[in-house]
Image (tube, rainbow, N blue to C red):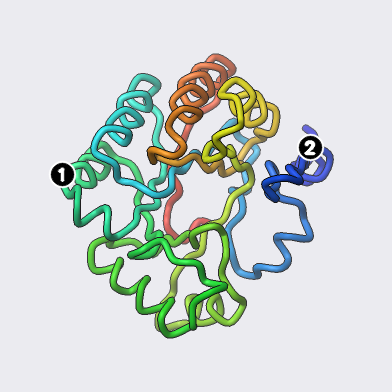
Amino acid sequence: MIAPHFWRESKAKFFRKDLFFITTPWWLRRLFPGCLWDIKTKEKEIYISFDDGPHPTITPFVLAELKKYNAKATFFCIGDNVKKFPQVYQQVIDEGHAIGNHTMHHINGWKTSDDDYLNDIATAGQQIHSKLFRPPYGRVTRSQLRKLHNDNVKIQTVMWSVLAGDWIATLAPEKCFCQVRDAVYPGCIIVFHDSEKANDRMSYALPKLLEHFTARGYLFKKIVENTA
């Protein structure tokens, strides 16, 4: 089997206009020590995640699509949305998916003091009982990471291997699907969004991704806390 690092390095693509990598290069991973970027496995396993929910109609759509393929996923929720839509949040849990903290107000760590950032995460933690955490926009400072990862807090910061780019309005849904499909490798962590901004692309790409890789013997699994 071709080593995962070969796929990460050879398939990395860069949108100059929107400044994001579809697949995460090795050097970017080194800038954020102690984070989880993928799951080390030789099995046919894919880890889909969703940011920014829960949403009253989009999240139930995602859950229905996942159920069709007996797929599990990880939902990084905004605390404020959990307060607004507690029944949808509970549905995610009841259907056996993993949950993670995505801050209370979707704040940017690069523009926020360490104390304010950690307080916002802690406030979200009153609603979201999980040690999994994903920084909004992937923007978190090294000092914030050190404080999150210390022995008292013990947060597990989950980044990603593959970005769908589903929030970009100019990205055609078909291209969104194809880019994700071509970047997948065993153990990769994919980011979609269960949000209105991303829905046109996500709602097209997700069902096709589930169908495509299920037919090829892959399983879709949730991220488990303390997965190394």
Left or right, 107 with respect to 175, comes to left
- Amino acid on which the number 2 mark rests in the picture: Lys
Position of the N terminus, as image quadrant, is: top right
Position of residue 102 relative to residue 219, above or below, is: below
Spot occupied by residue 28 in the image (x, y as percentages of width and height):
73, 60
Q: Callout 1 environment at 10 Å: few (<14), some (14 to 19), or many (20+)?
A: few
Image location of residue 138, percent across then percent down: 57, 60
In the rendered structure, the answer to whether residue 42 lies left or right of residue 84 reads right
In the rendered view, tell whether residue 23 sits above or below residue 203.
below
**The C terminus - image quarter:** bottom right
At 30% from the left and 66% from the top, the residue drawn is 124
**Label 2 CA crowd tier, 10 Å (few <14, some 14–19, many 20+):** some
User: Count the marks: how many?
Assistant: 2
Residue at horizontal 59 percent and vertical 64 percent from the top: 35
Label placed on residue 11: 2
Image side of residue 128 versus residue 215, left or right: left
- For the residue marked with disc 1, what is the amino acid? Gln
Quadrant housing residue 62: top left
Q: Residue at x 42, y 60 (%)?
A: 132
Q: Which mark is residue 22?
A: none
Q: Secondary structure at mark 1?
A: helix
Q: Which mark is residue 87?
A: 1
Element type at marker 2?
Answer: loop
Residue 106, how many percent across, how many down? 41, 61
Q: Residue at x 56, y 56 (%)?
A: 159
Q: Is residue 56 left or right of residue 16?
A: left
Q: Residue furthest top?
A: 215
Which of 179 and 221 lies nearest the eye of the viewer?
179
Q: Earlier in the sequence, mark 2 or mark 1?
A: 2
Work out how far the residue at label 2 is from the one at label 1, CA to CA, in angstroms. 39 Å
Q: Between residues 149 and 180, which one lies in front from this camera angle? A: 180
Give residue 197's position: percent from left, percent from top: 44, 39
